[in-house]
Amino acid sequence: MKSIDPNDFKVTDKIKLSKIPTLLNIEANDDEKEEKLDKVQAKLSDLQDVMYSHNKYGVLICLQGMDTSGKDSLIREVFKEFNPRGVVVHSFKTPNSTELEHDYLWRHYIALPEKGKFAIFNRTHYENVLVTRVHPEYILGENLPGIESVEDITPKFWKNRIEQINNFEKHIAQNGTIIMKFYMHLSKEEQRQRLLRRLEEEKHNWKFSSGDLKERTYWKDYMKYYEEAINKTSTVHAPWYIIPADDKEMSRYIVAKIIWEEMQKHTDIKEPEMDDKTKDNIEMYKKELGEG
């Protein structure tokens, strides 16, 4: 099996999604992929324990992608060895009435990871420049000053919102949040096959929604706005990674490997040392415990 280099997936220059493959030929069968993932899972779990004791960084994992791109199963498989105390998953759906009474980033800000923990955003703050670009009428629900109709939503509005997102990420990164953003790059044909499976396999019927078919008709628009958002918001402190998503097993391993490799750059994450007073009295404490 060929080795994975995170830099091959990181967005550092302007990209065009239509030129990037949705399937990676890695020369490995499913068993090999699973074995590789198992090893990285265990290392990430150990790392999370160290992070928890170090208590200075939080890690934010952002997952974006079209319907059926494998976000849910990726979360389940990549993070299943984590201590439940150390990871929290947030799935951001249509804003509720309380959320709409605040600015669009509020619900994301309050879901940020505590120090020592991982937070996973399954769909993210980028929905606010993706779904709302395809369906600008949704912006009207935010009840914004000066926005009375779709015609009031100008290109400057979207430019400002992208800038706000960049500022948000810069702020939280400077205050100890490690950010990694993954776009699950799925082909339209693979999505068609996965939607068909949801209809054909009874155990997956519950996953099917007619709304998925409606959104599928906007595929070109979504690709356009994903491309624009990724190009304008992939930064040193909050990079985007484009993950080939036609092979679910492979995409899970790639994401896990990238998280592990990127976390190794933070060499200051270590378990705290025992204080001198406790060290000096270890033998005494052992004796007390030995006496029952």
Image (cartoon, helix red, strand yellow):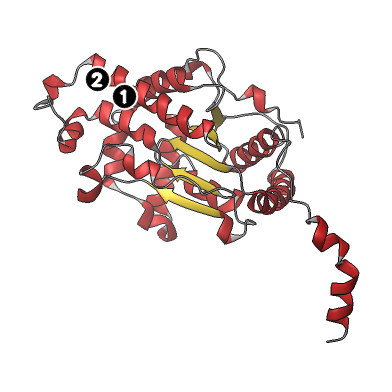
Relative image position of residue 171 (x, y in whole percent): 46, 30
Q: Which mark is residue 161?
A: 1
Q: Please tell me whether mark 1 sits on a helix, a strand or a loop.
A: helix
> On screen, 79 above or below 29?
below
- All told, the count of numbered labels is 2
Kind of residue sitting beneath label 1:
Arg
Position of 137 with respect to 104 (left or right) is left
Residue 124: image quadrant is top left
Which residue is at a point 62% across and 29% down the rendered structure image?
24
Position of 199 with respect to 268 (left or right) is left
Kind of residue sitting beneath label 2:
Phe
Which residue is label 2 attached to? 157
Residue 242 or residue 220, whichever sits in front: 242
Which residue is at a point 65% across and 50% down the rendered structure image?
48
Residue 232: image quadrant is top left
Residue density around tag 2, few if under 14, some if 14–19, many if 20 or more, within 10 Å: few
Residue 190 or residue 69, whichever sits in front: 69
Q: Quadrant of the C terminus?
A: bottom right
| In contact (CB < 8 Å): disc 1 and disc 2 | yes
Which residue is at a point 55% across and 23% down the rendered structure image?
21
Relative image position of residue 283 (x, y in whole percent): 91, 70
Gap between marks 1 and 2, in whole Å?
A: 6 Å
